[in-house]
């Protein structure tokens, strides 16, 4: 089993960070894993998406289901079709340092079948990738100008 976890503090309030977790076009700006929605409408518990990662013979396609969605606080997911990998994860947002947001993520991946043979290699790459994605999200959000109040 592979476990991962990381966090960043983003100099933006949770309400500015949240859309980058739940809106597909914004999520695609920082995540290297393309996600294809399988359910219509806005993201909610029970929503499903297909994602693919890896390459060549080490390519996996999984279906994830949103298991919890608490706006501006938490999003959790789990696999419902495994393809050799069972993945559970979550993102948590919490206020930090005045107007900032502490964004953390954690998860576990369990491999079966031939995937077990590459688990140590894949595990190290997943841990590095998850940290890099949060750092990329932080950079994107801290470059976006804050909305100006209308008068």
Image: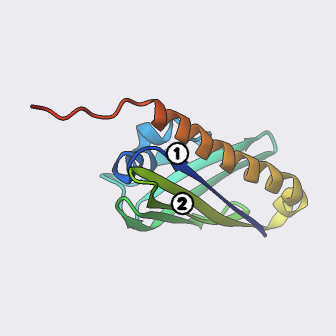
Secondary structure under badge 1? strand
Q: Which mark is residue 35?
A: 1
Q: In this rendering, would 119 be left or right of 23? A: right
Q: Residue furthest left?
A: 151
> Measuring 46% from the left and 60% from the top, which residue is drawn there?
93
Residue 48, horizontal then vertical, whole percent: 45, 58
25 or 136, nearer to the observer: 136
Tell me: residue 113, above or below residue 17. below
Q: Looking at the figure, which quarter contains the C terminus?
A: top left
Query: Residue 67: image x %, image y %?
Result: 46, 69
In-image side of 28 versus 145 (left or right):
right
Q: Residue at x 37, y 58 (%)?
A: 72
Of the two numbered discs 2 and 1 on the same chain, state the one appearing first in sequence: 1
Q: Residue at x 58, y 49 (%)?
A: 51
User: Which quarter of the rendering shows the N terminus?
Assistant: bottom right
Callout 2–callout 1 Cβ contact below 8 Å: yes
Q: Nearer the viewer, residue 46 or 98?
A: 98
Q: CA distance from mark 2 to mark 1?
A: 9 Å
Query: Residue 138: where, in percent of width, then height?
Result: 54, 41
Q: Residues within 10 Å of mark 1 (few under 14, many from 20)?
A: some
């Amino acid at each position: 089993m592979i476990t991962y976890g990381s966090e960043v503090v983003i100099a933006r309030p949770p309400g500015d960070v949240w859309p980058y977790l739940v809106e597909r076009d914004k999520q695609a700006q920082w995540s290297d894993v393309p996600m294809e929605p399988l359910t219509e409408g806005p993201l909610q518990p029970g929503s499903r998406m297909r994602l693919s990662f890896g390459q060549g013979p080490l390519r996996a396609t999984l279906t994830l289901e949103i298991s919890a969605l608490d706006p501006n606080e938490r999003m959790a997911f789990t696999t419902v079709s495994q393809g050799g990998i069972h993945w559970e994860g979550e993102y948590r947002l919490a206020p930090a340092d005045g107007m900032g947001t502490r964004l953390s993520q954690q998860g576990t991946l369990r491999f079966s079948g031939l995937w077990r043979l590459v688990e140590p290699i894949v595990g190290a790459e997943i841990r590095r990738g998850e940290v890099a994605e949060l750092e990329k999200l932080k950079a994107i959000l801290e470059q976006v100008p804050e909305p100006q109040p209308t008068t």
